[in-house]
Amino acid sequence: MAYEFIIVEKKDHITTLTINRPEVMNAIHPPISQEMDAVFNEFAENPDEWACIVTGTGDRAFSAGNDLKFQATEGPGAVAEGFAKCKGGFAGITSRFDCFKPFIAAVNGLALGGGFEIAMSCDIIIASENASFGLPEPRVGLMAGAGGVHKLPRHIPYHLAMGMMLTGRRVPAQEAAQYGIVNEVVPLDKLMETANNWAAQVLECAPLSVRASKEAAIKGMEMPLEKAMTEMFPGMSAMYSSEDLMEGPMAFVQKRKPQWKGR
């Protein structure tokens, strides 16, 4: 399928989606959001796609967030209507709460506002050394309404989160790593190699085990510990009834790499 605003590559069970609007710092407007949503919908439903990497074109920005120029031209009503067509919310990912396949953000520069919200919607964040993160919406009379105000205080300590949100300041990659926002900071020319290495490590694990782990971790955080530890989540049921449940121990005994089927 041809896309106007994104580049999509699928290889070895990995889907890589590149936000491709470098002329506007990879800002997100409804048309690109709908394209991303379609890709993420297909990724979620396709049993042969096991991990997804999200990145941006160029060396300046992962995404500068909501396209304010588009909003000023088309009006907030058109913007709201366009985003409402996306199952996964803004950029097709910020409200995607029913996909337990892993997402990796490869942040290649500025991740501001909605761009930071996209990154926080991923499970692993790799940042280039020139990357920075922030929720500057209050500086333009808005708020991080695509989940930023809710996710950031859940990702890092309250006062660190509020310090970022109430001032709109940018946090450089190394500081973000100290906060625990990112998993690894690397030179820009090593960013995609590193993201793919992380994806490859994910793929060394059984796909259904990865999804069961993500689902249990996310849903379990909403429960008291005792209840979470006794809950049988749907992903766990799928894992326990899969062919891969036998493949893992068999490969261990036979001293070979497991041949995962994801079923």
Image (tube, rainbow, N blue to C red):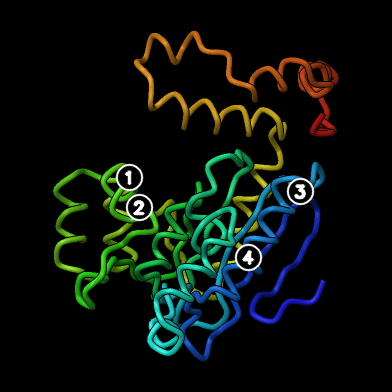
Give the CA distance from mark 4 to mark 3.
Answer: 15 Å
Residue 52 visible in the picture? yes
Closer mark to the observer between disc 4 and disc 3:
4
Amino acid bearing label 4? Met
Mark 4, residue position: 36
Judging from the image, what secondary structure is the residue with disc 4 in?
Answer: helix
In the image, residue 209 above or below residue 188: above
Residue 251 visible in the picture? no
Mark 3, residue position: 49
Mark 3 or 2 closer to N-term? 3
Place of residue 119 in the rendered image (x, y in percent of width and height, measured from the top left):
45, 59
Amino acid bearing label 2? Ile
Q: Nearer the viewer, residue 99 or 122?
A: 99
Closer mark to the observer between disc 3 and disc 2:
3
Name the residue at 52% across, 42% down. Answer: 97
In the image, residue 260 above or below residue 46: above
Mark 1, residue position: 155
Mark 2, residue position: 181
Give the CA distance from mark 4 to mark 2.
Answer: 23 Å
Mark 1–mark 2 contact, CB under 8 Å?
Answer: yes
Give the CA distance from mark 3 to mark 2.
Answer: 26 Å
Amino acid bearing label 3? Glu
- Image quadrant assignment for residue 135: bottom left
Give the crowd class for mark 3: few <14, some 14-19, many >=20 residues within 10 Å. some
Q: Nearer the viewer, residue 95 or 76?
A: 76
Judging from the image, what secondary structure is the residue with disc 1 in?
Answer: helix
Place of residue 176 in the rendered image (x, y in percent of width and height, measured from the top left):
30, 58
Closer mark to the observer between disc 4 and disc 1:
4
Mark 4 or 1 closer to N-term? 4
Mark 4 or 2 closer to N-term? 4
